[in-house]
Structure formats: C-alpha cells, structure tokens
Amino acid sequence: MIATVTRRGKAWLGRANFLMGRTPRVESRADFRRFIPAPYQAVLLISADFELAWGPRYAKGAGDPLAFARQKARQERENIAPILALTEKYGIPITWATVGHLFLDSCRPAGGKKHPEIPAVPHYRGPFWDYTGDDWFEHDPCADYRSQPEWYAPDLIRLILDSAAGHEIGCHTFSHIDCRDAACPPELLKAELRACKALAAQWGLTLRSFVHPGHTIGNLDVLKAEGFTSFRTDYRNVLGYPKRHDSGLWEFGQTAEFAFRKEWPASYHASRYIRILKRAIASNTVCVCWFHPSFDPVIVEKVWPEVFRFIDAHRDDIWTGTHQAYVDFLEQHR
Ligand SMILES: [Zn+2]
Ligand SMILES: [Zn+2]
C-alpha cells in the first residue's frame, strides 16, 4: 500500500518536474555548432542495451532473478522484429550496445571451465546486482542459440545488421560485468573487451561505441586503449552537449530512457518524449535516449509510432545517427 502510494507520488512528481522544465536539465552554449551539424537544430542519439538474460540474471528485487532474466530475454526477443520494422520505416538508426556472448552460436567449457579466457570476477556489491558466487558464468548453459535462445543471439544480430536503417553494433562487455574501478580490475575489462572484439571481427565489425552495464562507469583508460570512442552516462537527465575527456573519449550524458511507467498512460509517454525533442530543437542541444529492448511492448506498439512520426516530420531540424557517426562529426569539428 505504502509502496503504491510512493510510486504514484513519484509518478506525479515526475510529471510536475517535467512540466516545470526541471528535468531534463537544459544546457546552452553559444558555440553549439561544434556539436550540432548545420543546418540542423538538434541531435538525437538512440542506443539499446542489448543483453538478453545476461543483464538481469542477478537482478536485485526479483524473487527468482534467473527466471526473471529468462522471461526478460524472451520478451526482448519478441520485441526485436517490431523495433526493427519501425526504425526501418522511419529511417532511425540505433546503436546496439551488445553483450559479446550474444555473438556466439554456441559455447562449451574448455578444460572443465566456462570461458577460461575471462579472469575470475571478484565479489562486489553493486547498485542493481551484487556478485557473491563462485563462478561468474554459473548460469551460462554452454549450449546453443536454438536450445537456449536467452543466452545467444546470432540470429538477432544478423537481423539488425541486415536492416536498412543503418544500425551500429556497439559493446556492452562480454558477460555484463560491473565496470566500476572499485569492482573491476583492468585486466578483467580488457579480457571482456578483447573477447567481444575478436567475435565482432568474425562478423566484419569493429566495435567503437561502449555502454557500461548498469551504468557502472569506470575503467575509462581501458576503453580508450582498446579503441573505443564513446560511452554513455546517467549522472542526471540532461539536454546538453557531449564532453570530451582528456583521453579523447567522448561522454554522452543521458536525456531519457524509453521505458513504460504503468502510472502514466501511453499517450502521456509519447507526448513527454515529443516535448523533450521540441525542447532539444528550441535549445540546440543533444538528446541522448536509450532503452532496454526487453521493455514493455506498449513502447513499440503505442509510444514510438507517435514519437517517430514527430521525428520524421522534423527531419530538417533533427540530425539522427549512431554514436560512432556522431563521434565522426565531433572529431571533424573540434
Ligand atoms: Zn558461454
Ligand atoms: Zn545492461
């Protein structure tokens, strides 16, 4: 009861703060042309944390995290085709931050050990999940994508790459590790990234764009050394500008997540995202949206069609592209 009231209160507060323009925070700068390609008025980036069961398999608050993760993975699989159809219809490319294990058709233990190429993961407590087990890969079925489609996705990656929308495959680590400096030794992230890069190379892909699992920002030096060019952060919701770190890595601060809140009707979701885009156009800023493809399908059925129609009707105002295409622009205009 109290939880319901709190949730409703938060939902109401969320609408009020949005209406008052308190969130997302809007930045402004006179030299916005360094960040907004002429003649456009705003930039829109959309990325997906593409992870199937790997993301939520230790989720806190889920009674049975493994069952929850498998259910999320099945929902994610069902959502991919409608997501691709809609992005193709409106020509909106997405940056798919992909868990590297999804590239695999199958896997099996070597010398009695699952994925011995990845160093042991130390125990830690994290914001969305803790790790206290004996084997980080304990839930890896060591099977194939036909029998265990919650853990592998070469079929889906093929669909994404074949789509005419011009999507980018990015990186979300090999096994959805916590990347914070305090939780992740550099060698661990390095091994994860190298596993992803080696698999991507077999697909003819070079991975450049990175998203930390669960916003566990860290090990930025390793990212840079392994050839990545950008990462996304969630410190606050902002319509602003990317930040170039001394290392040369670009940081994209998030504006909004595409997610369904049951306290709000679908029509309010659509109008809220459209208002955010209007604010981006009015303020000449960058809108960084992201989502979990396992989201409530109401987003792709009812919310996105309206939002994407708006984007399509404002093609001349909104530049939309992948994270790497945008980094290419930024580097040319420094
Ligand atoms: Zn495996
Ligand atoms: Zn994730």
Image (tube, grey):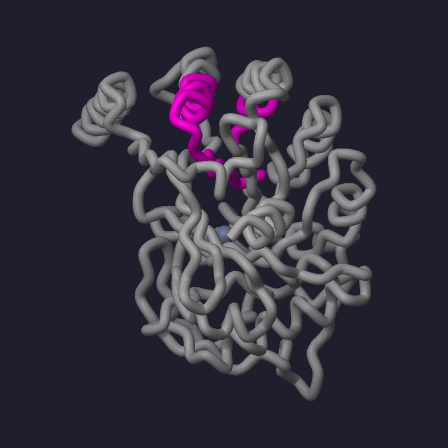
Total numbered circles: 0
Please tell me in which quarter of the rendered image ligand 1 is found.
bottom right
Q: Position of residue 245 (x, y in %)?
A: 41, 62
- Name the spot of residue 108 as percent of width and height, x first: 73, 73
Residue at 57% in and 43% down = 48
Up the image or down, 46 lies above or below 264; here it is: below
Q: Quadrant of residue 202?
A: bottom right
* 92 relative position to 268: left or right: right
Q: Quadrant of residue 116?
A: bottom right
**Residue at the far bottom in the pictured view:** 111
Q: How far across and how far down the image is residue 175, in percent? A: 56, 64
The answer to whether 31 appears left or right of 96 in the picture is: left
Quarter containing the N terminus: top left
Q: Is residue 331 above or below residue 36?
A: below
Residue 297 in which image quadrant: top right
- Above or below: residue 182 compared with residue 10: below
Q: Residue at x 46, y 34 (%)?
A: 287
Question: In the image, 132: left or right of 53?
Answer: left
Of all residues, the one furthest to the top in this rendering is 267
User: Do we see residue 52 in this rendering?
Assistant: no
What's the residue at 66%, 72% (across, down)?
195
**Can residue 212 be seen at all in this image of the molecule?**
yes
Magenta stretch: includes residue 290: yes
- Residue 104 included in the magenta stretch of the image: no
Whole-percent x and y of residue 318?
A: 56, 26
Q: Residue at x 65, y 56 (%)?
A: 151
Start-end of magenta stretch: 274-301
Q: Is residue 255 above or below residue 187?
A: above
Is 46 placed left or right of 199 in the picture? left
